[in-house]
Amino acid sequence: MERKKLYIKTWGCQMNEHKSEGIAGLLAQHGYELVDRPEEADLIIFNTCMVREKPEEKIFSEAGMVRRLKERKPHLLLGVGGCVAQALGKKIFERSPAVDFVFGSSNISDIPRLLEELEARRQDGRRRDEPVMAISKIPDRIEDLPFVRQSRFQAKVTITEGCSNFCTFCIVPYTTGLLRSRLPGDVIREVSELAAQGYKEVQLLGQNVDSYGRDLDDPDITFANLLRALTRIEIPRIRFTSSHPKDITPDVIEVLAEDNNICEHVHMAVQSGSDKVLRDMRRGYTKEQFLELVHELKKRVPDVNITTDIIVGFPTETERDFEETVDLVKRARFGGAYIFKYSPRPKTVSYYKWPDAVPPEEKQRRLEHLLQLQKRITAEENRKYVGRTVEVLVEGEAKPGSGRYLGKTRNKITTIFPGRPEWVGEFVKVRVEEASVAGLFGAVVEAPTPTPAPTPTPA
Ligand code: SF4
């Protein structure tokens, strides 16, 4: 039987990308295969996220494009899930008649049932009086999904979902629920299976990985203990994201400092350098405490690459507060930073407590100032690698047909070099000749040893 075609558009973070792998895996069991273009699809899914951006307008304009596709292809279906679906629910149908069904942040496993319901309605000619949707009021479970992974050598593994921190600007606890941790045995089993399948790198995912286990009734279940268990699995690289400055513990730093498969990259959002703004954001640390942590990590973990997220234009951020952030960025010397302009999210404390007081042009000025500063620091930090040899996992060609390939170092710095297609998914050693804000550039001094072909077994 011919398989139906599925196109998934994903917004937002790596956790959402991984959820899309779960949607693809689940629907593969129901006769769908992924395609790269919406025009080819029988089913389009929008997997949305509103953590870092306000995507509603984009989502509804893309739904308008699907509506035009439906004129040519009346059987085409559109489902909307993720954060926006969780936050807007039924209203999505009011705003876009192109949407056929809606599912919440922990309702992916309901998609086949929703599709069956749509099919039943189509067959008996029922009109869409009741919306076809599944939204758990509060997302309360980590779904067990059969992932179709996008890469054959890099895999993502969720260890927690949700967050119980309630930073005042953040919508995560409202759209993805409170912290839920997977049991360590389940995580260890999944990583072991990936290692057995030949994966080279696993990325552990959670909104705040350092809070892993705090919702489970066992003091031995901690992020440090989980990492330690994973060091015993034969897989070359294990990464994790994101860390929270108030929750990262000395044991985690200890594991990072040891010679093992845990990579020396810590993505740790600071958000602001002003103690007043950090307090208003309810972040749980001060500027000096954060800088001490950065100092400790750099002292204990050779070559650690610390990257961060920063929000500019929080409602209570004055020029003086912004200068504190500039000072923090100069002193922390991050390897990279994602810098965002504050934008209010309904349901959050900051939305109700303070007007969005910093004018848009001032937010833009602060953003550009920090971006320029961080670019200069990133380039300077990268230049420290010139003359050194680094290990790189090759991800693919930098530009199609260029013959130049790219990959990441253990501490997650992009590295570009002349390469060969058969190196994709393998480790190479690159001697760094130049560096810039874009990463490291050099030549391969040690190519991968070709994996021997399996010996045929006698008949
Ligand atoms: S730690 Fe704060 S910013 Fe991060 S997900 Fe939780 S509530 Fe949001």
Image (cartoon, rainbow, N blue to C red):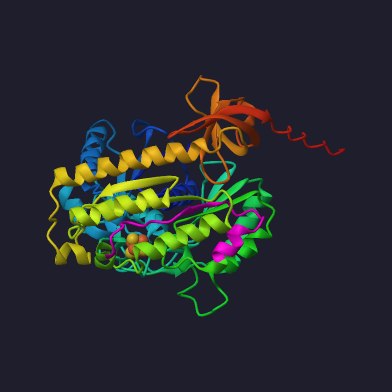
Could you say which is closer to the camera, residue 130 or residue 434? 434
Lateral position of residue 40 relative to residue 435, left or right: left
Q: Position of residue 139 (x, y in %)?
A: 35, 66
Name the quadrant containing residue 442.
Answer: top right
Lateral position of residue 451 relative to residue 281, left or right: right
Q: Position of residue 392 (x, y in %)?
A: 60, 38
Could you say which is closer to the camera, residue 392 or residue 377? 377
Lateral position of residue 144 relative to residue 393, left or right: left
Q: Position of residue 4 (x, y in %)?
A: 43, 39
- Which residue is located at x 69 percent, y 30 percent? 447
Question: 342 above or below 2?
Answer: below
**Residue 272 is covered by the magenta coloring:** yes
Q: Quadrant of ligand 1?
A: bottom left
Image quadrant in which the C terminus is located: top right
Can the viewer see residue 7 in this picture? no
Q: Position of residue 103 (x, y in %)?
A: 32, 56
Name the quadrant containing residue 408.
Answer: top right
- Which residue is located at x 64 percent, y 64 percent? 229
Can the viewer see residue 251 in this picture? yes
Name the quadrant containing residue 138.
Answer: bottom left
- Which residue is located at x 45 percent, y 75 percent? 215
Could you say which is closer to the camera, residue 304 or residue 218? 304
Question: 331 above or below 74?
Answer: below
**Residue 160 is covered by the magenta coloring:** no
User: Residues in magenta?
Assistant: 252-275
Q: Residue furthest right?
A: 458
